[in-house]
Image: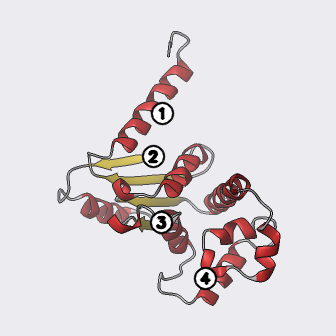
Amino acid sequence: MLAILAEAGLGKSRLIAETRALLPVNVTWAEGRALSFTAGMSYWLAREIVMSLLNVKPEAAQSEIAAALQKAWKGRPRFIPSWLDCWNCLWTPAVEDRVKFLSSEALRSGILEALGGYVRRRARHEPLVLVWEDLHWCDPSSWEVLEMLVPVSNEVPLLLLCAARLEDNRLLEGLAKRTMDAACATSSACHH
């Protein structure tokens, strides 16, 4: 994970753009940006990143989004209902029948498993850079997806590039905790 933390207007987005220009052609780049009004919209930032991975424009028709999602999950039908829940506009009666008796926790777990599995599978075939921009406006569901992907980045060639304003204490606290956990894992003298 690479985090860029700075005050507004100090060039976080420019630094990200310059980083992208330096990447080899075999690296897949996908990015999403949280907006001030999306902080309460479930999976907004995660959806933005997945849409970028699928090469689907945000203004694409629902049928185009559904086709890209189905293609991405070919051969993995048990994940599709959870996956489609992130795009609740794509519900069909068949999907609804498969998920209507799931608890919210089971659906949430299914979404995390589906997103994590998709990113892991993609990164095994091609190095990935996932850009999480403006995390200070990130919705809680996307934040949970990001936290779930951190250990995945230890398994496959995956870089999580995060940008946030300094006042976003969640990112700072998360980085500090992960640094402490990593240090403790290598030291027998660590006390919490």
**Mark sitting on residue 1:** 2
From the viewer's perspective, is the residue at label 1 or at label 3 nearer? 3
Q: Position of residue 109 (x, y in %)?
A: 69, 53
**Residue in front for this viewpoint, 54 or 24:** 54
Q: Which mark is first along the chain, 1 or 4?
A: 4
> Is residue 76 something that shows in the picture?
no
Up the image or down, 58 lies above or below 151; here it is: below
Query: Which residue is located at x 32 percent, y 61 percent?
Result: 16
Which residue matches tag 3? Answer: 41
Residue drawn at (52%, 52%) of the image: 146
**The residue tagged with tag 3: helix, strand or loop?**
loop
Q: Disc 2 residue type?
A: Met
Task: Judge the density around disc 4: few (<14), some (14-19), many (≥20) Cα neighbours within 10 Å.
Answer: many
Secondary structure category for the residue under label 1: helix
Count of numbered marks: 4
Residue appearing at x 50%, y 73% in the figure? 52
At which x and y percent is residue 19? 34, 60
Location of mark 4 (residue): 65
The earlier-in-sequence mark between 2 and 1 is: 2
**Above or below, 32 relative to 185:** below
In space, the residues marked 1 and 3 are separated at their CA atoms by 27 Å
Q: In the rendered structure, are the residues bearing label 1 and label 3 in contact, judged by CB atoms less than 8 Å apart?
A: no
Q: Position of residue 97 (x, y in %)?
A: 82, 74
The kind of residue tagged 1 is: Arg
Cβ atoms at labels 2 and 1 below 8 Å apart? yes
Left or right position of 22 against 11: right
Amino acid type, label 4: Ile
Name the mark on residue 178: 1
Give the percent coordinates (x, y) of residue 87: 60, 74
- C-beta proximity under 8 Å, tags 3 and 4: no
